[in-house]
Image (tube, coloured by chain):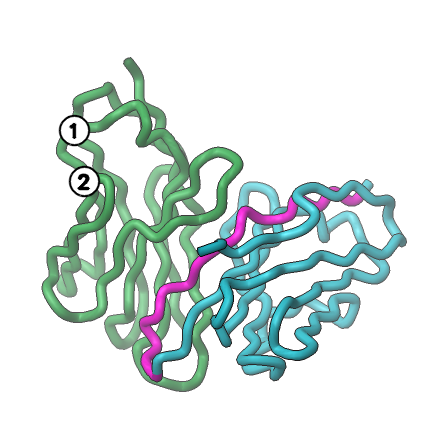
Amino acid sequence: EAGVTQFPSHSVIEKGQTVTLRCDPISGHDNLYWYRRVMGKEIKFLLHFVKESKQDESGMPNNRFLAERTGGTYSTLKVQPAELEDSGVYFCASSQDRGTFIDTQYFGPGTRLTVL
Amino acid sequence: AQSVTQLGSHVSVSEGALVLLRCNYSSSVPPYLFWYVQYPNQGLQLLLKYTSAATLVKGINGFEAEFKKSETSFHLTKPSAHMSDAAEYFCAVSPRMDTGRRALTFGSGTRLQVQP
């Protein structure tokens, strides 16, 4: 079974440009999460999809970030326009929905974003 | 609000020595607790999780953690370190009450070095 995959693995862009990150969850996982780790700090939650709906977007830093999950499969996270402080590693995770909330979140390898 | 504190951003042990990575949480209600590990160039992998069954939780690769409510701690241990244990370790919590929120709150991570 394939794990969570993320694309690209690295992205280097200039301030003001747009970047789109993609996450493919484990097949059959209805829950999809985005997290971010800014250099040297803790991993922070951004948002949570259940299928195609945003269940919780309390961690989204501002309106330059747009997450979508059309059709309830893969998700994209767009940053437009990118700022220097957006640099970091963006992780995606997915989990099944068995009616409990101790379902394990499985993480992808992350996308390292560098904004120059 | 929940928070997680990991004491020691870097821990170095000799091969064969005891590994002890510390995690303390702050929550009005004991949360679910997790330890994740990130090996170089890989995603986060679940080591173990506490969900209110036994307070001593055994995980993969010989790791275990003990939930101590009186100390609000969930320290990770391994009796004998192996070179392959070198990685970054993250303690995380999620809320117990089903508010629909499933966001993990992470500590800042502890990088474990194993010396030959």
**Which of marks 1 and 2 precedes in the sequence?**
2
- Residue A68's x, y, as percent? 70, 73
Identify which amino acid the numbered label 2 is placed on: Gly
Give the residue displayed 43% in from the left and 37% down from the top: B39
Identify which amino acid the numbered label 1 is placed on: Ser
Label 2: which secondary element = helix
Quarter of the image that includes the C terminus of chain A: top right
Tag 1 residue: B80
Magenta range:
A99-115
Give above or below for A106 relative to A109: below
Q: In this structure image, what is the colour of chain A?
A: cyan
Residue B62: give its label: 2
Relative placement, left or right, of A102 versus A29 is left
Asked if labels 1 and 2 touch by Cβ distance under 8 angstroms, the answer is yes
- Residue A32's x, y, as percent? 54, 69
* Magenta highlight on residue A101: yes
Give the residue displayed 71% in from the left and 57% down from the top: A21
Give the residue displayed 35% in from the left and 85% down from the top: B98
Q: How far apart are the alpha carbons under marks 2 and 1?
A: 9 Å
Relative placement, left or right, of B1 versus B12 is right
Q: Residues within 10 Å of mark 2 (few under 14, many from 20)?
A: few
Q: Residue furthest right?
A: A16
Q: Nearer the viewer, mark 2 or mark 1?
A: 2
Q: Residue furthest front?
A: A1
Label 1: which secondary element = loop
Give above or below for A50 relative to B9: below
Q: Quadrant of residue B94?
A: bottom left
Q: Residue furthest top?
A: B116
Q: Chain of mark 2?
A: B
* Chain shown in green: B
